[in-house]
Image (cartoon, rainbow, N blue to C red):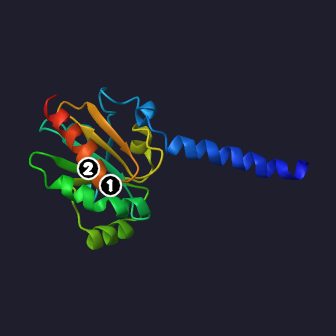
Amino acid sequence: MMRFLPLLAFAVLAVALWVGLYREDQEALRSTFLDEPAPTFEVPLYGAEDETLSLASMTGEGPAVLNFWASWCGPCIVEHPEITKLSKLDGVRVFGINYKDKPEDAQRFLDRYGNPFTAIGVDQRGRAAIEYGVAALPETFVISGEGKVIYKHTGPIGPGDYENKLLPAIEAARGE
């Protein structure tokens, strides 16, 4: 009996994770940042040594989308076409935070898949990700022009998410 205890513990943990990931009511996992001011941050601007990307530089001009990504993140590749579609919306600026990545790897990613970002911040130490409560990449936030978090998307954005979640969140951000 004792030799099956680790297997039983693993099975219980696997079922709990499965239920959590595929629950019907995803709002039960609501972010504490929703409808609150976005956390402030300041990170170096990708490709510009003396400049920074900050919440202040993202707000004031209508909705902004903030996407945490990395070249080593497989789901980031999957969602990249949806991020590119977001970047083509009128009046929406898409900002990227490149998380703990090598600069040459980030550049290869952008060269291969395209650069949909208005600007990219470099979060080499992971401080901005901590401020936003990023648990795993990718994570995407819709932020109003006044700097309020309207929506948080955990995981890769799929076509259904683009239409059913991101676009309504962007429209809500326009109304803020």
Few, some or many residues within 10 Å of mark 2 (<14, 14–19, 20+): some
Give the number of callouts: 2
Secondary structure beneath label 2 = helix
Q: As rendered, which of 139 and 39 lies closer to the eye?
A: 139
Secondary structure beneath label 1 = loop
**Residue 149 position within the rendered picture, expressed as x and y whole percent measured from the top left:** 29, 33
Mark 1 vs 2: CB contact within 8 A: yes
Q: Amino acid at mark 2?
A: Tyr
In the picture of the structure, the residue carrying the numbered disc 1 is 158
Residue at 16% over, 37% down:
171
User: Is residue 34 found left or right of 115 in the rendered image?
Assistant: right
Q: Amino acid at mark 1?
A: Gly
- How far is mark 1 from mark 2, CA to CA? 6 Å
**Residue 108 position within the rendered picture, expressed as x and y whole percent measured from the top left:** 33, 72
Taking 148 as reference, is 112 above or below it?
below
Q: Is residue 47 visible?
A: no
Q: Residue furthest right?
A: 1
Q: Quadrant of residue 31?
A: top left
In the picture of the structure, the residue carrying the numbered disc 2 is 162
